[in-house]
Amino acid sequence: MTKPEKLMIDGKRLDGRGPNELRPIKFKAGVLKRADGSCYLEFGGNKVMAAVYGPREVHPRHLQNASRAIVRYRYNMAAFSVEERKRPGPDRRSIEISKVSREALESVVLEELYPRSAVDIFVEILQADAGTRVAGINAASVALADAGIPMRCLVSACSVGKIDGEVVLDLNKDEDNYGQADLPVAVNQFGEVTLCQMDGHLTEEEFGKALDMAVDGCKKLHEMQKQALVEKYGTMVAQPAEEEAKANGGVANE
Amino acid sequence: MEREIVVPGDMLGEDPKLAGIGTYVQDGRVYSANYGLVDRRTNIKVIPLSGRYIPARGDLVIGKIVDMTFSNWFADINSPYEGMLHISEFPERVDPANMGKYLHIGELIIARVEDVDPTMKVELTMRDEHLRILKQGRVIDISHVKIPRVIGRNGSMISMLKKDLNVSIFVGQNGRIWMKGDDKYVDLAIRTVFKIEREAHTSGLTDKIKEYISTELEQLRNTT
């Protein structure tokens, strides 16, 4: 697509959204059988799969920490995720995204519970449409919870940007390419910002406004994340027999 | 009875004294640290719906010997941490120069977790009744959070399985289950356990499983 003349017409964006609207979002928790936890996410045009393994033994050994678990995050774009074939494998961009995304999630994982172990998070971008790193963080956060990893809370992320001089929530591909700024933000439920990057220019005033919008967007995402986890088991949850069973342990055996 | 599903970060109460397992306290409030079901009967705890087995003192587990060093065996106990079995914890006197004679790599054992220290060094013992080497039978792995359902309230599920199928079963806390008996019945028992694992979160499970076993047994009889 060539640069459109205007990205905002009469307060509406090219895809018909208002300035404060997110794209359509669909979470699905627990989609992979072999992973400890997983999540598939459609975030506008983005299609993202996240898988979590662990806590498990650390390999290579020298990475292990005697007092806490380590968190590893791999962000990867599929070769077919963008229009022009992406050369497979890690590149400078995805290594950076892996690092910042890991830091965005690390702060909520209760790492001290599992010394000498690793929690591995894999995020595959199957289809990219601007804002893949925030989509990845949202999916990874749900996958972590699904894997039963103890956490302080979930992390939600979304981006804000500036197009045609106006601050808008959740940029799509064209707005990202031809807009003036892009600001991906991750926030946990306590309002702590765990990711904040910026590309382009915003005035101080715009930045403040943008951050507020992003925090609001993250709140909406947080609700959807919770919803996805609750839906995985539906409403038919029975009373587990763990007390009785615990007391029995091996006695019930043989 | 239905239970409430919570996700990490859900506020569960205002009294820090009630914080139990699967929760944490921040600013005088109790929050869930896990994705699971809340139990408010005595204190507030969250029973996880998934997760790896983490050894705790007193657990009976099924381990597989993976390594041997001078005076210690190491067992994989289906957990991020390996279990260590010292020769003094073996039921008989062991000649340290010839440890392979007693227990070799690849063998399965029933052991008890004697101690877990803060660095997660796991010490196992085999010096007790029922703790032994598994020479026969089959072992399957399921998720350890589903183990309580396999055992059932007061062991109702497991005793039903044993009685109806005439199979000896040992359930390890680490999600491993050993079974011995007639092949056809062990096959059925394994299928049943996997069914329990899949449907662990539904109610009225024992009745459902009872029905499943009886129809399957019927089929077995008809085919032979």
Image (tube, coloured by chain):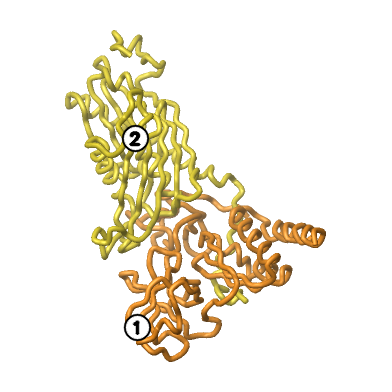
Q: Could you say whether the residue bearing mark 1 is in a helix, strand or loop?
A: loop
Q: Which residue: 38% across, 38% down?
A: A124
Viewer can see residue A45: yes
| Residues at marks 2 and 1, CA–CA distance in whole angstroms | 49 Å
Is residue B141 or residue B136 the one in the foreground? B136
In x, y percent, where is residue A178? 26, 17
* Amino acid type, residue under disc 1 in the picture: Ser
Q: Chain of mark 2?
A: A
The outermost residue toward the bottom is: B93
Q: Which chain is orange?
A: B
Q: Which chain is yellow?
A: A
Quadrant of the image occupied by residue B28: bottom left
Q: Could you say whether the residue bearing mark 2 is in a helix, strand or loop?
A: strand
Q: Which mark is residue A77?
A: 2
Q: Which residue in the structure is indicated by mark 1?
A: B71
Structural crowding at the residue carrying mark 2, measured as other residues with C-alpha within 10 Å and reported as few (<14), some (14–19) or many (≥20) = many
Q: Quadrant of the C terminus of chain A?
A: bottom right
Q: Which residue: 48% across, 63% down?
A: B43
**Is B61 displayed left or right of A137 in the figure?**
right
The outermost residue toward the right is: B222
In x, y percent, where is residue B20? 43, 63
In x, y percent, where is residue A120? 35, 51
Same chain, marks 2 and 1?
no
Q: Chain of mark 1?
A: B
Name above or below for residue B25 compared with residue A41.
Answer: below
Is residue B6 or residue B198 the one in the foreground? B198
Q: Which mark is residue A165?
A: none
* Amino acid type, residue under disc 2 in the picture: Met
Q: How many marks?
A: 2
Name above or below for residue A181 compared with residue A99.
Answer: above
